[in-house]
Amino acid sequence: MEFPERISAKITKAIAAELEDLSEEKLAEIDYGIAAFIANSYKMVLIFILAFLLNIFQYFLIAIISFGALRTFASGVHAKREWTCLPVSTSIFLGITYLGITFDLNIHIINLVFILCFAAILKYAPADTEERPIVSRKLRKKLKILSVITILVLYAIAMYSLGTKASSIITFAVLVESILILPVTYKLAGSMYGTGLKISNKREVIK
């Protein structure tokens, strides 16, 4: 269990002790949210500083908000070690930013990308990990719905800002996050896909 999961588990356990009427599904939501926040907070500070020094902060902000909004609900493959997480995250965010700055995507490409990504979100989101499995079916359904809403909102913003760098950055952010939830990406990264769903199915069989 990595550092964010260890801390979130302790905090969730303390919350459960204080609020005994919370359901298992609600505790799972709390644990998931705390782990996601801890995992992203400390490294974001360092990446923000780097973006500022590279003089791309305003574009970087669009990239991280777009990517982060969808990833919060859709999740996806993670670096298997904490020490590799920062360089991988930096490469992803700066890559999205520079791709959006460099390539002006037209409406046809944007529409195609969002159609493919929407299909991926419908089929594979939320994509959990071995370290942070999403066992609760109720939580999985909620996260899928929120993922769908988020990608639709991002599409609307991309269309509204069509012809600007922001539109291209949003599109690349959605594309990268959608790739990170694919089973083939998990396989290439040496991670197990659908851990929480498998655990949930085993529980149903036992019942």
Image (cartoon, rainbow, N blue to C red):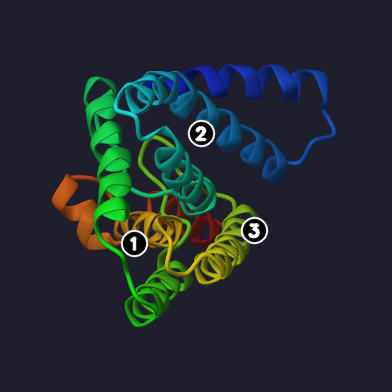
Q: Nearer the viewer, residue 75 or 30?
A: 75
Q: Secondary structure at mark 2?
A: helix
User: What is the quadrant of residue 150 in the picture?
Assistant: bottom right
Q: Give the side of residue 147 with respect to residue 56, left or right.
A: right
> Where is mark 1, residue-wise?
175
Q: Secondary structure at mark 3?
A: helix
Q: Work out whether mark 3 precedes mark 2 in sequence or the reverse, and give the earlier one.
A: 2
Q: Position of residue 37 (x, y in %)?
A: 54, 29
Q: Secondary structure at mark 1?
A: helix
- Residue 59 seen in this snapshot: yes
| Real-space CA distance between mark 3 and mark 2, rounded to the nearest whole angstrom | 16 Å
| Real-space CA distance between mark 2 and mark 1, rounded to the nearest whole angstrom | 20 Å
Q: Work out whether mark 2 precedes mark 1 in sequence or the reverse, and give the earlier one.
A: 2
**Residue drawn 83% across and 25% down?**
19
**Residue drawn 73% across and 22% down?**
15
Is the residue under label 1 in contact with that under label 2 (CB below 8 Å)?
Answer: no
Q: Nearer the viewer, residue 163 or 93?
A: 163
> Which label lies toward us, 2 or 1?
1
Q: Give the side of residue 126 with respect to residue 191, left or right.
A: right
Checking the image for residue 142, the label placed there is 3
Checking the image for residue 36, the label placed there is 2
Q: Position of residue 146 (x, y in %)?
A: 62, 59
